[in-house]
Image (tube, coloured by chain):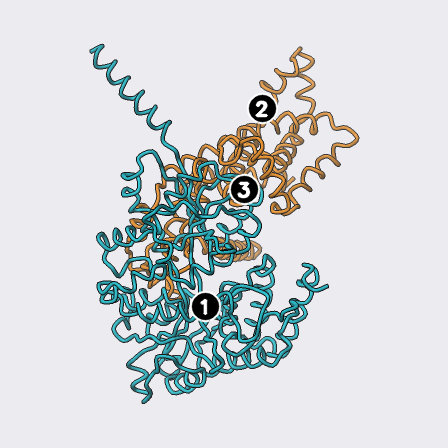
């Protein structure tokens, strides 16, 4: 009897999970469906069965070079993630293994910077970028993306590092490991799964960032977010073309997410169940 | 082998030297058909100006406005040519953010620019932006449905006629709405239409002392007429319809009449996308016999920000893109029907264009019927037909647009919407220092 209940529970839970997953995925699915419609079909209301035309993709490809935007996206998301890890690993290490009186406050303060709307600092940032010649440069944007994602990276790494018993590090120190050796040979290998999932999540966040990437670039450093933005039209129909551009822009990150879903899920639920 | 390597090296070095010499200008633009077409035709420009390279930045309209404003206000120098509208030009020119266009060349023929458009883009007699394409608004109607209703559309209809025709054409059982009008909130959406409409009802946004006028009977008449007309004869969910939504409805044969941008004529008469392409007639925007019609005036124009380091190259490009030669270039490659409309008088005198674009005369008459410097029946302290050319208007126009959209949706009454609009406008104008 008990077993029957648990099977029933399981079925309900699975069904609920599927429904929630479908709900979350539906906007993306509908974007992909719409990209295979003609402009007329796209605006005619809800319809899950497109005519299967690829004219939007042809138009999008003819109108602007996808590849340049794609390369910029790869460079910016990967570059900013590596930069962020270089800064965040030592920071999280010190907070996790030798916390001071203010560690908790510093962590909260770092997180609080994420609570301010980005537009509030648009002008100061724009002026700094202008005066340092960083407008429309990949390096400038890479630093910007690193900075805005840094609080999340530090927090995630901090949570992972806290799970690692401090005694292991102590043992390493007993064996004469220097600080550098301790971080590189003891801590990092143990934290690889955590670092990997932080990295993946950060790449996704940087890839999708659409406020600064549009506002601090013009032509040279513009990534895929700017590419999508160029397909909205003040006069005329553009839903199908916009959907095609969006599908092209999210495809790489979607595929990457698919292949690394195990690490992602592990990373996101790490420490949740003890 | 060595010689070959050497000559290859020399060749690439000289290419590099040439590339380094070439000046590159960055052009910010919106994604509409005419602008996209221009990007495909720039070989003609680079052939004539081999030392100038063009870089394009295409953005969504509101993002473009924000990007360009940020850049121009901080003198960021990211753009050398920017696409802006008749709303921005007078405001930005007064701030000295734009360079006057005084080096457009001897062949440019500034006088050929349609006067109403040139006025909208000039401050103190100086041209600060060159029109790339211009538009007004007019009535597009279904000739077959009009005939079925036993009516004949005059060239210059009144609002009463529009109401009468809408009532007769409405056939909701068959999915036909007598009239489709904008309802989606936004200063460039429903407020473009309603502000232009209010001009023909004798209303105005502000009196000579910048006091908001939403508490006056003229605004009440405008909004009440609009809401009643749309409730009885408009499409379902009209309060979320903008240009694109109404375009789709009209193309699918679901509207008897549609009052909107003249540029829509080329879409609704295109048999590839429109099911009613051969049944569309055109008429001037309606009036109430007060001397002003309910049509607007807009021109997407090319301007040069004061912060650019490449003013000469930028002027060369602006001159090329808005010249008579450019119109002929488009005509030779894509036919006269695809020429950007509404900028030059000579285009409308061209018999080939008149033949290719049956809506040409009505477009020109509509543009000429709008006067941005005297937009209303009573005097006003501002410039602009469907907008008020002050920096505060974007925010205020959208707030009022939301109130009027809610009135159309039935969430508030017309009186409440007007009262709240009056309060919002008074607050904004007091804060801005217009009302002492």
Q: Which chain is orange?
A: A
Question: Can you say which quadrant of the picture contains the C terminus of chain A?
Answer: top right
Residue B94 location (% of width, % of height)? 56, 52
Depth check: give the residue in front, B246 or B156.
B156
Question: Mark 2: few, some, or many residues within 10 Å (few <14, many ≥20)?
Answer: some
Is residue B220 in view? yes
**In 3D space, how far apart are the residues under numbered discs 3 and 2 (Cα atoms)?**
31 Å
Residue B350, by quadrant, is bottom left
**In 3D space, how far apart are the residues under numbered discs 1 and 2 (Cα atoms)?**
66 Å
What hue represents chain B?
cyan
**B115 left or right of A184?**
left
Q: Chain of mark 2?
A: A
Q: Which label number is shown at residue A96? A: none
- Mark 1 falls on what kind of element? loop
Position of residue B236 relative to residue A163, above or below, is below
Residue A31, by quadrant, is bottom left
Residue linked to disc 3? A212
Q: Nearer the viewer, mark 1 or mark 2?
A: 1
Residue A92 location (% of width, % of height)? 65, 29
Residue B16 location (% of width, % of height)? 34, 24
Depth check: give the residue in front, B229 or A15.
B229
Please give the count of numbered marks on the rendered protein: 3
- Mark 3 falls on what kind of element? helix
Question: Mark 3: few, some, or many residues within 10 Å (few <14, many ≥20)?
Answer: some
Q: Let me know if marks 1 and 2 both belong to one chain.
A: no
Which residue appears at 30% of the width and 46% of the height? B40
**B24 left or right of A262?**
left
Residue linked to disc 2? A188
Position of residue A159 relative to residue A189, above or below, is below
Residue linked to disc 1? B296
């Amino acid at each position: 009897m008990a077993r029957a209940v648990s099977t029933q529970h399981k079925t309900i839970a699975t069904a609920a999970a599927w429904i929630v997953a479908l709900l979350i995925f539906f906007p993306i699915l509908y974007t992909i469906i719409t990209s295979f419609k003609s402009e007329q079909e796209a605006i005619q209301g809800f319809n899950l069965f497109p005519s299967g035309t690829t004219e939007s993709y042809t138009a999008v490809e003819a109108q602007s070079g996808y590849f340049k935007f794609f390369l910029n996206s790869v460079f910016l998301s990967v570059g900013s993630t590596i930069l962020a890890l270089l800064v965040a690993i030592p920071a999280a290490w010190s907070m996790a293994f030798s916390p001071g009186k203010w560690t908790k406050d510093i962590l909260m303060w770092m997180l609080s910077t994420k609570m301010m709307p980005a537009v509030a600092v648009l002008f100061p940032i724009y002026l700094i970028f202008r005066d340092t010649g960083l407008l429309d440069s990949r390096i400038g944007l890479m630093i910007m993306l690193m900075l805005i994602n840094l609080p999340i990276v530090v927090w995630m790494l901090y949570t992972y590092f806290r799970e690692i018993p401090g005694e292991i590090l102590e043992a390493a120190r007993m064996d004469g490991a220097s600080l550098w050796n301790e971080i590189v040979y003891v801590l990092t290998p143990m934290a690889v799964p955590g670092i990997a999932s932080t990295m993946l999540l950060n790449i996704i966040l940087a890839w999708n960032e659409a406020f600064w990437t549009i506002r601090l670039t013009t032509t040279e450093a513009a990534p895929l977010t700017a590419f999508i933005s160029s397909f909205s039209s003040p006069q005329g129909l553009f839903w199908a073309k916009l959907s095609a551009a969006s599908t092209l822009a999210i495809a790489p990150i979607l595929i990457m997410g698919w292949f690394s879903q195990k690490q992602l899920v592990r990373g996101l639920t790490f420490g949740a169940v003890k | 082998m060595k010689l070959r390597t050497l000559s290859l090296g020399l060749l690439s070095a000289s290419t590099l030297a040439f590339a380094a010499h070439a000046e590159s200008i960055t052009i910010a633009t919106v994604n509409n058909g005419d602008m996209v077409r221009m990007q495909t035709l720039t070989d003609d420009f680079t052939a004539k100006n081999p030392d100038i390279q063009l870089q394009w930045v295409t953005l969504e309209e509101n993002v473009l406005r924000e990007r360009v404003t940020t850049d121009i206000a901080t003198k960021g120098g990211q753009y050398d040519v920017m696409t802006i509208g008749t709303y921005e030009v007078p405001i930005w020119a007064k701030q000295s953010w734009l360079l006057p266009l005084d080096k457009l060349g001897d062949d440019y023929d500034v006088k050929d620019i349609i006067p109403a458009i040139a006025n909208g883009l000039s401050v103190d007699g100086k041209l600060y932006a060159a029109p790339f394409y211009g538009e007004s608004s007019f009535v597009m109607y279904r000739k077959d449905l009009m005939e079925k209703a036993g009516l004949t559309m005059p060239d210059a209809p009144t609002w009463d006629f529009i109401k009468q025709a809408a009532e007769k054409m409405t056939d909701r059982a068959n999915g036909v709405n007598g009239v489709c009008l904008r309802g989606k909130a936004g200063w460039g959406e429903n407020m473009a239409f309603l502000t232009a409409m209010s001009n023909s009802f004798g209303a105005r946004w502000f009196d000579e002392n910048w006091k908001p006028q939403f508490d006056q009977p003229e605004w009440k008449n405008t909004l009440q007429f609009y809401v009643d007309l749309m409730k009885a004869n408009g499409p379902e969910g009209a309060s979320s319809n903008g240009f694109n939504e109404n375009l789709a409805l009209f193309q699918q044969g679901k509207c008897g009449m549609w009052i909107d941008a003249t540029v829509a004529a080329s879409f609704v008469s295109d048999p590839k996308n429109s099911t009613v392409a051969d049944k569309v007639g055109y008429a001037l925007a309606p009036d109430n016999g007060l001397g002003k019609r309910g049509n607007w005036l807009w021109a997407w124009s090319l301007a040069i920000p004061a912060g650019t380091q490449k003013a000469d190259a930028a002027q060369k490009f602006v001159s090329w893109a808005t010249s008579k030669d450019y119109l002929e270039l488009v005509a030779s490659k894509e036919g006269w029907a695809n020429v950007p409309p509404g900028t030059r008088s000579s285009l409308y005198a061209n018999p080939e264009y008149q033949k290719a674009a049956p809506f040409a005369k009505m477009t020109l008459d509509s543009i000429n019927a709008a006067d941005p410097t005297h937009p209303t029946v009573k005097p006003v302290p501002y410039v602009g037909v469907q907008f008020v050319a002050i920096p505060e208007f974007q925010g205020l126009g959208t707030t009022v647009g939301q109130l009027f959209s809610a009135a159309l949706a039935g969430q508030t009454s017309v009186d409440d919407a007007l009262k709240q609009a009056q309060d919002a406008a008074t607050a904004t104008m007091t804060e801005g220092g217009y009302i002492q």
